[in-house]
Image (spheres, coloured by chain):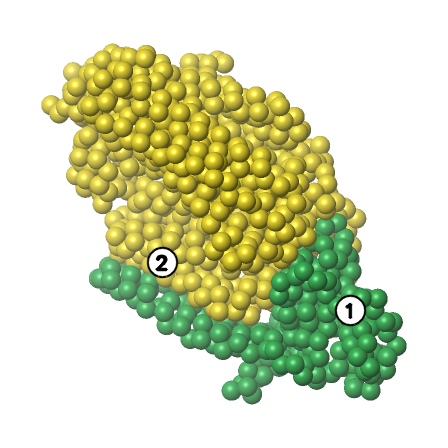
Chain colours: A green, B yellow
């Protein structure tokens, strides 16, 4: 099952289709995936695209037929159209789609596994700050660059210090809002070392565009070194008085 | 034959003399639905032009990377205003205008139920919209997005007047949406031709009926949200500020509780156009009439249950996500039923590829694609990726342009001969269609890819290395093509209006009643009103237009120089009453001007002026009906065709009584939104429980309970038959109601003044606003009671003519109910929540 999902997500195949338009190696492309969450959503997209295209072609063909062969449906009883087209057809399409979507969505929810490394993320106009625990357990901080270890899932606890922002690294996972007074969780994982660009996806004022950041995925050794070089954080993690 | 013609001309002269609108400046006094409907349509089209120019600015800016054309500050105003103008100042008013023009003619009536309200709504729309456009011209336009998310739109982060212009301007415009909703429902319920039972109504009326109900329940949450946000901005009462117990998510819930139904509010009237025009051009009655009615009602219910699908990324609990995802995909069913009913009708008929049909085919193509991407967006994981990207921009334009603009262009070409009495000489319509259709798809089809490649919405530029350069360039080129198409459409319409040749009557061979009028229609629509026995009245009686013109229908006469039309029983369409309508008057314009002073004073923070203007508006509204009515009972009067019915003033099912009931539905929705907000904050918002709770006060509670009970009893007694026939008692019981309201006002006042400063915490702020809300109602209750007494003294009230007291009684009872609920909420919630 998983192998099949991978097949859809494999960038070569995906790009084969998208290349007709532009190629999908853009730095923020949701289709040039580099992590399991983004990959699973990309396969969902290709499945839906194929299904939607088929439905669209069928409906348009019906319409064309009406004009090319006038009266072809004169003998079809009204209930064929209403029960068949209006009820049976969407039911046949939507039921499997919903099941597939719930199944694939279920695996994307951050599960409360205490072994997963946690990073507190605070958004403010117009920067991102990330607070981790280093090897000794002391809080360290980086700004506008999130360091993670390749192959290790990281749970991000995201909030905002002012207006609503949204944390989005398209090549790794879907987005989630950073809302003042609330903490939202997002789990990300990178499959390969590299730099993955992220942006604020919720309009947040005049410098909304400039609120960009990067996720750097390091190998285990590199990651340890990078974490050790970060400055200590003045305060630990998220502000009090918020509801998860 | 000549006799019939002379009859028709004589009747026309008599009717036109009393129904006509004066010329010159007197045009401003128009209340006639054909005129007001046209004004709505033309004004909406002007706003469409403004919104379109803003769209062109956006596409010009995004055509190339790192363009220096617009900076972020201007760009933010431009995209905010593009969305706001298109939604609030174009789409809704356009279909309101079309409905206002068409409905009475389709239903076989002479006007809408409340012509002066039509005019008042129009002026509110024009003035409110102008506030926004003036803001744009001065460079002070709103810039927080058309969705106005807090805290970005709060005073801390948007200190200027920009956000206030949005909140106050839009709320002003919403008066017209709510008044149109009430008027549409009452007109469809009551002002139909005798015999037109609900199941014989044209589908267009069903669509508009459902749309109007959705507006009635959809707009109040937005209005409440806007008022709360304006109060937070102006007086620092926290509702959305998380540091003081507010929650930005409350705004999102209130906004999308309106915003999602809004999409269907825009789509349904357009679908109504499709269901009307398509069967005519397919030369086949529509299949599945009842299926369609059931599916639009289902769509309306569903649309209120899935607002959360605009909020899939805010961190909603995950079972709720699954529910809203399933509910969102369920919308596909009623939409598919309609889609296949249309295709089935075409397949069973002999469709003609005339110009309106081309636009309908454009609608099928574009809307089908928008629907399919809509299902994709309802799938939660996919939504997490493409939410707030250009994929959504593409989707929403496919839905709104496909589901609204294409049908409206079809409507324009279909009904233009009716509006103007003219047919085109040479039509540019086909060229315009292809330009718009191709331009649209070039712009937006490719934009799906732009979104998938990661381009977020609402960014004013992008880098050359983003991979979006070509996609954006092509989109911009397509949009210019589309703009040329719309320009061509405008030229075409102007040419047809000014230079077209005379059109023949009923050029499309339609079967609905609007084509039974002359073209263009006379001021009174029908010289006499038809009898309806089927869904296709015009096909049943070919001679109907001339029969009606020569007076061979209901009310084929002029009585006492009064404007009259007929009212029917809601479901059966049985003749029930003779409704008298008002003629041209400047009062709606003056009232709207005073209302405008109120809103502008709020905007400029002249609160004393605003208070005075509010009082003046109430007084002016009362003058509408101050001297309106009969001084003696008339009993049943002739309605034509040998039938008789009482005047509407002497029934309990009069249109105005219904209007009050519907207004109270809307009011109750607003009140529930407020109560929902309070509960929501208590359960979800940060920094709760509040530092202090409000102490129950026995004297205040007693005053409120006793006062409101008295108001209830006074109201109930005031409309009892025995009381109504006794002039002295008729004044006594409204006085009891008024005294009850005053006592409760004193109680509410005690509670509000004893409260700690409401700016300290959202709990206090919400409580304060809840109390102020019911206090305002009690205050207006005193006014209603007083008005009933004044009318009774003026001789306008009797056992039969009791409308003023009945309307007042509805208000008193409603106020008593929400007042007691408020008391329960204020003192009960802390207890229930276990603080």
At which x and y percent is residue B558? 24, 15
Q: With B606 as the anchor, is B545 left or right in this view?
A: left
Question: For this rendering, which residue is in front, B808 or A145?
Answer: B808
Q: Residues within 10 Å of mark 2 (few under 14, many from 20)?
A: many
SS type, badge 2: helix
Rendering coords of residue B308 (x, y %) = 51, 58
Residue A25: image quadrant is: bottom right
Residue sitting at x 27%, y 19%: B729
**Which sits in the foreground, A25 or B89?**
B89
Q: State the residue at coordinates (78%, 65%).
A: A129
Q: Chain of mark 1?
A: A
**From the viewer's perspective, is B431 left or right of B723?**
right
Q: Quadrant of the C terminus of chain B?
A: bottom right
Q: Position of residue B434 (x, y in %)?
A: 51, 49
Residue extending farthest to the front is B698
**Residue depicted at 38% across the width and 39% down the height:** B817
Between the residue at mark 1 and the residue at mark 2, the CA separation in whole angstroms equals: 52 Å
Q: Quadrant of the N terminus of chain B?
A: top left
Is residue A60 at all visible to an observer of this figure? no
Q: Position of residue B614 (x, y in %)?
A: 53, 25
Chain letter for mark 2: B
Residue at the image point whose x is 28% and y is 37% from the top? B189
Q: Which residue is mark 1?
A: A236
Q: Residues within 10 Å of mark 1 (few under 14, many from 20)?
A: some
Q: Nearer the viewer, residue A237 or A5?
A: A237
Q: Which residue is mark 2?
A: B334
Mark in front: 1 vs 2: 1
Query: Marks 2 and 1: in contact by CB < 8 Å?
Result: no
SS of the residue at dot 1?
A: loop
């Amino acid at each position: 099952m998983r192998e099949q999902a991978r097949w859809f997500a494999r960038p070569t195949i995906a790009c084969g289709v998208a290349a007709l338009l532009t190629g999908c190696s853009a730095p923020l492309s949701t289709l040039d995936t580099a992590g399991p969450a983004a990959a699973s959503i990309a396969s969902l997209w290709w499945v839906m695209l194929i299904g939607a295209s088929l439905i669209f072609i069928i409906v348009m063909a019906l319409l064309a037929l009406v004009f090319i062969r006038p009266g072809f449906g004169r003998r079809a009883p009204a209930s064929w159209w209403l029960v068949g087209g209006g009820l049976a057809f969407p039911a046949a399409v939507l039921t499997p789609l919903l099941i597939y979507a719930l199944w694939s969505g279920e695996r994307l929810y951050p599960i409360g596994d205490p072994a997963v490394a946690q990073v507190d993320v605070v958004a403010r106009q117009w920067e991102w700050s990330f607070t981790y625990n280093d090897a000794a357990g002391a809080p360290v901080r980086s700004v506008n660059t999130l360091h993670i270890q390749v192959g290790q899932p990281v749970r991000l606890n995201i909030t905002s210090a002012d207006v609503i922002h949204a944390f989005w690294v398209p090549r790794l996972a879907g987005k989630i809002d950073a809302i003042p007074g609330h903490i939202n969780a997002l789990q990300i994982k990178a499959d390969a070392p590299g730099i993955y660009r992220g942006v604020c996806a919720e309009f947040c004022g005049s410098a909304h565009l400039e609120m960009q950041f990067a996720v750097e995925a390091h190998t285990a050794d590199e990651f340890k070194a990078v974490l050790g070089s970060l400055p200590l954080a003045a305060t630990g993690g998220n502000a009090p008085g918020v509801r998860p | 034959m000549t006799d019939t013609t002379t009859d028709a001309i004589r009747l026309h002269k008599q009717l036109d003399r009393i129904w006509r609108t004066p010329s010159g400046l007197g045009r401003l006094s128009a209340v006639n639905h054909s005129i007001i409907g046209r004004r709505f349509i033309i004004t909406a089209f002007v706003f469409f032009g403004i919104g379109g120019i803003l769209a062109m600015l956006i596409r010009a800016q995004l055509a190339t990377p790192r363009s220096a054309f617009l900076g972020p500050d201007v760009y933010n105003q431009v995209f905010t205003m593009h969305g706001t103008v298109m939604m609030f100042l174009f789409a809704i008013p356009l279909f309101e205008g079309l409905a206002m023009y068409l409905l009475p003619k389709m239903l076989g009536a002479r006007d809408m139920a409340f012509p002066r309200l039509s005019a008042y709504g129009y002026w509110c729309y024009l003035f409110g919209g102008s506030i926004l456009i003036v803001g744009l011209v001065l460079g002070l336009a709103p810039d927080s997005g058309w969705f106005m998310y807090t805290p970005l739109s709060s005073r801390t982060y948007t200190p200027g007047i920009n956000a206030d212009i949005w909140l106050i301007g839009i709320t002003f415009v919403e008066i017209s949406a709510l008044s149109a909703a009430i008027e549409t429902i009452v007109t469809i319920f009551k002002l139909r031709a005798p015999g037109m039972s609900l199941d014989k109504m044209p589908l267009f009326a069903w669509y508009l009926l459902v749309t109007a109900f959705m507006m009635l329940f959809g707009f109040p949450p937005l209005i409440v949200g806007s008022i709360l946000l304006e109060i937070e901005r102006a007086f620092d009462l926290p509702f959305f500020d998380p540091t003081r117990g507010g929650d930005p998510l409350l705004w999102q819930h209130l906004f999308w509780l309106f915003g999602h139904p809004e999409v269907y509010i825009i789509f349904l009237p357009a679908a109504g156009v499709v269901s009307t025009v398509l069967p005519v051009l397919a030369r086949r009655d529509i299949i599945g009439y009842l299926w369609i009615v059931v599916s639009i009602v289902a769509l309306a219910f569903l649309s209120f249950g899935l607002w959360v699908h605009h909020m899939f990324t805010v961190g909603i609990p995950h079972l709720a996500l699954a529910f809203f995802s399933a509910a969102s995909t369920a919308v596909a069913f009623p939409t598919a039923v309609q889609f296949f009913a249309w295709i089935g009708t075409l397949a069973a008929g002999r469709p003609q590829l005339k110009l309106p049909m081309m636009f309908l085919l454009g609608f099928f193509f574009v809307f089908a694609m928008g629907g399919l991407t809509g299902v994709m967006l309802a799938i939660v994981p996919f939504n997490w990726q493409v939410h707030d990207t250009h994929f959504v921009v593409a989707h929403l334009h496919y839905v709104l342009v496909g589901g609204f603009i294409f049908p409206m262009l079809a409507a324009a070409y279909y009904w233009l001969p009716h509006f103007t009495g003219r047919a085109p000489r040479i039509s540019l319509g086909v060229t315009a269609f292809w330009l718009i259709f191709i331009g649209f798809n070039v712009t937006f089809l490719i934009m799906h890819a732009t979104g998938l490649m990661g381009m977020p919405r609402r960014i004013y530029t992008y880098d050359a290395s983003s991979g979006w350069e070509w996609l954006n360039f092509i989109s911009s080129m397509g949009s210019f093509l589309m703009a040329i198409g719309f320009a061509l459409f405008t030229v075409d319409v102007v040419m047809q209006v000014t230079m077209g040749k005379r059109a023949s009557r009923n050029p499309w061979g339609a079967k609905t009643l609007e084509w039974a009028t002359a073209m263009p229609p006379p001021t009174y629509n029908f010289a006499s009103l038809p009898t309806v026995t089927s869904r296709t009245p015009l096909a049943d009686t070919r001679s109907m237009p001339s029969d009606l013109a020569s007076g061979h229908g209901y009310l084929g006469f002029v009585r006492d120089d009064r404007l009259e039309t007929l009212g029917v029983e809601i479901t059966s369409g049985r003749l029930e009453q003779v409704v008298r309508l008002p003629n041209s008057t400047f009062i709606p314009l003056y009232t709207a001007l005073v209302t405008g002073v109120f809103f502008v004073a709020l905007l400029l923070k002249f609160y004393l002026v605003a208070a005075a203007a509010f009082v003046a508006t109430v007084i002016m509204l009362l003058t509408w009906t101050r001297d309106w009515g009969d001084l003696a009972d008339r009993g049943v009067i002739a309605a034509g065709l040998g039938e008789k019915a009482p005047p509407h003033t002497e029934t309990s099912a009069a249109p105005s009584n219904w209007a009050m009931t519907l207004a109270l539905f809307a009011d109750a929705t607003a009140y529930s939104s407020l109560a929902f907000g309070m509960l929501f904050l208590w359960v979800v918002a940060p920094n709760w429980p509040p530092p202090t709770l409000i102490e129950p006060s026995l004297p205040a509670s007693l005053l409120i309970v006793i006062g409101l009970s008295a108001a209830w009893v006074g109201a109930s007694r005031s409309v009892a038959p025995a009381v109504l026939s006794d002039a002295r008692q008729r004044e006594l019981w409204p006085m009891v109601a008024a005294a009850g309201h005053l006592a409760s006002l004193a109680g509410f006042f005690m509670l509000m003044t004893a409260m700690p400063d409401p700016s300290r915490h959202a709990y206090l702020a919400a409580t304060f606003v809840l109390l102020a809300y019911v206090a305002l109602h009690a205050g207006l209750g005193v006014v209603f009671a007083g008005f009933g007494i004044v009318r009774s003294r003026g001789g306008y009230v009797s056992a039969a003519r009791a409308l003023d007291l009945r309307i007042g009684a509805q208000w008193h009872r409603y106020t008593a109910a929400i007042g007691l609920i408020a008391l329960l909420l204020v003192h009960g919630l802390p207890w229930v929540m276990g603080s």
